[in-house]
Amino acid sequence: MSTVLREYTGLKVSLPEASKIEKLPTKRHVTTIWVDRFNNVVDDDVTVKKVSDLRTIVYNKLVADPQLIVSLRVDKDADMGIISDIQQELRKANALRVNYSALPTH
Amino acid sequence: MAIKRRRERGEIEIPSASLPDIVFQLLIFFLVTTTIDVDKGLDLVLPPPGSTQIEIAKKNITNLLINDSGQILIDEEVVPVEEVDNIIRDKLLENDKLIVSVKTARKTKYNIYIKVLDQLKKAGATRISIAEPEES
């Protein structure tokens, strides 16, 4: 079958809006990190208790799939502090391609 | 007997001539209403870990700070979000080697950061550097 539906839902986030958005080139090589307004972090279907755990989680995924893109679905009311911490962990895990999920502006 | 004969004569059937119509209507309805959730967003490539500090000439850097109250400062001057696009585009025209260094505070809202990134993409800035947030 050609249609792939998502089997996990992550956290409830309200995404920010942006105009210069691009489609993710692929769906297969994507891991999604959710951050909600209460600064909870979920990677795909795993709840991340400490942001520092993210490094191993993402690193293992990157080893399994070197073309990995990290999609960040972050609530617009989240703080930049946690986002920056996540970005630092992603850098350490060598997962450098990120995509900030956003909705098209109306 | 009369009843039986009548049944044999006129077999009652549900008219099925319109069945293909119904099928096509359903098919078209679902084709139109189904939306497959596509991830869309702003692409960015993070710098590699532990990258050696690269010396960049001061004139090639523009500092863009978003403070915790959501104000945007380009080279120490407060500017509205909608203006970032134009200001950066002008600066890029003057100097195409320009690197925009985006710095946030830890309490800055993500929304404004995305807005600024969007503005930078609009301006055509490709060299964007993300600085570590300031402790506040």
Image (cartoon, coloured by chain):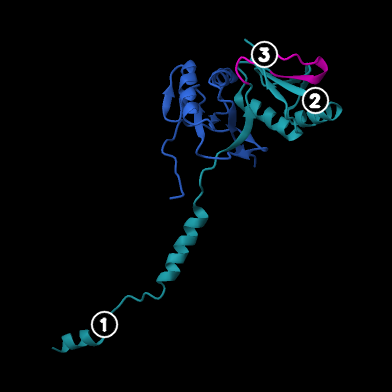
Give the crowd class for mark 1: few <14, some 14-19, many >=20 residues within 10 Å: few
Magenta segment includes A7: no
What colour has chain A?
blue
Tell me, by letter, which chain the rendering colours cyan. B
Q: Quadrant of the C terminus of chain A?
A: top right
Instruction: Label 2, secondary structure: give it.
Output: loop
Q: Do the numbered discs 2 and 3 sit on residues whose CB atoms are within 8 Å?
A: no
Question: Which residue occupies 53% across, 20% down?
Answer: A93
**Which range is magenta?**
B48-66
Gap between marks 1 and 2 measured at Cα: 85 Å
Disc 1: which residue: B11
Which residue in the protein does label 2 denote?
B97
**What's the amino acid at mark 3?**
Thr
Q: In the picture, residue B69 is in which quadrant?
A: top right
Q: Position of residue B121 (x, y in %)?
A: 71, 33
State the CA–CA distance, disc 2 to disc 3.
20 Å
Query: Nearer the observer, disc 1 or disc 2?
Result: 2
